[in-house]
Amino acid sequence: MAENLVFCSRCGAQNVGMSGFCQKCGASLSTTTLAPSAPVPPPMRAPVAPTPAISPYAGFWIRLLATIIDRIILGVVFVPVYIVSVLPALARAANRGMDDGPPFEVLAAMPVVWIAALVLPWLYEALLTSSSWQGTVGKKLLGMKVTDIAGNRISFGRATARFFAKILSFLICYIGVVMVAFTDRKRGLHDMIADTLVYKS
């Protein structure tokens, strides 16, 4: 590093900073000032990578897991209905034999099964989604809630519309459900129809 230079106040000559007298005219350098040193640049800092934004919306896989949990719960409820309505009719048809005609007991019991297969999931989802839970048991366990666009709790009517729109999502080869993985706010077709969002709480 170069030594500091001192300028003589009488003749202006440059002198080494350690000198007491000017080497040109002999004047005292005690009253002179040091030459201004060059500004030191600030130290270089490594660029900080921006922190990726965490989406507040529930994605495809966690919603799929919630659906599996809900299907297990509904299966536990639906099996007794099937046992009570269909199995006795099957037993009577087996005892009577097929020679006496078609098993009308079984056919008569099937509407009960179909109605239960539609009504139970509808009430399960619509009632829980419009309740203070704002979601089914599966969603509640995994920390999700269903809201409207403004983030408010939805009504029973909107929850019902969302349920039947979800059936449409299933009927079109599950495309309406797969849309959750590709839309910006993780909305399936049923969410778009019912104007709802699914948040991670």
Image (cartoon, rainbow, N blue to C red):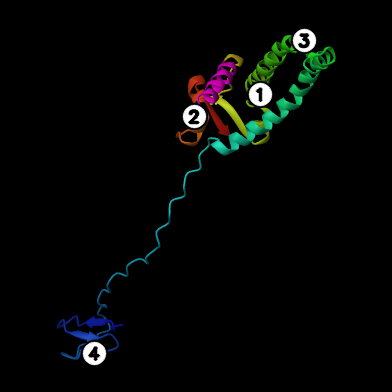
Residue 166 is covered by the magenta coloring: yes
- Residue 176, position in %: x, y? 50, 27
> Which element carries disc 1, helix, strand or loop?
loop
Three-letter amino acid code at disc 3? Glu
Three-letter amino acid code at disc 4? Phe
Q: Would you place residue 14 above or below residue 150 in this image? A: below
Q: Main secondary structure of the magenta part?
A: helix
Q: Is residue 179 left or right of residue 87?
A: left
Q: Residues within 10 Å of mark 4 (few under 14, many from 20)?
A: some
Q: Residues within 10 Å of mark 1 (few under 14, many from 20)?
A: few
Q: Residues within 10 Å of mark 2 (few under 14, many from 20)?
A: some
Residue 189 is covered by the magenta coloring: no
Q: Would you place residue 120 above or below residue 146 in this image? A: above
Question: Residue pushed farthest front?
Answer: 99
Three-letter amino acid code at disc 1? Ser
The earlier-in-sequence mark between 1 and 2 is 1
The range drawn in magenta is: 158-174
Image quarter where the C terminus lies is top right
Residue depicted at x 72% and y 26%: 75
Q: Which mark is residue 175?
A: 2
Query: Which residue is under mark 1?
Result: 132
Residue depicted at x 76% and y 23%: 79
Which of the two marks, 1 or 4, is nearer to us in this view? Answer: 1
Query: Which residue is under mark 3?
Result: 105
- Residue 45, position in %: x, y? 39, 63
Task: Residue 175: tell me if it is visible.
Answer: yes
The earlier-in-sequence mark between 3 and 2 is 3
Which of the two marks, 4 or 3, is nearer to us in this view? Answer: 3
Residue depicted at x 85% and y 15%: 95
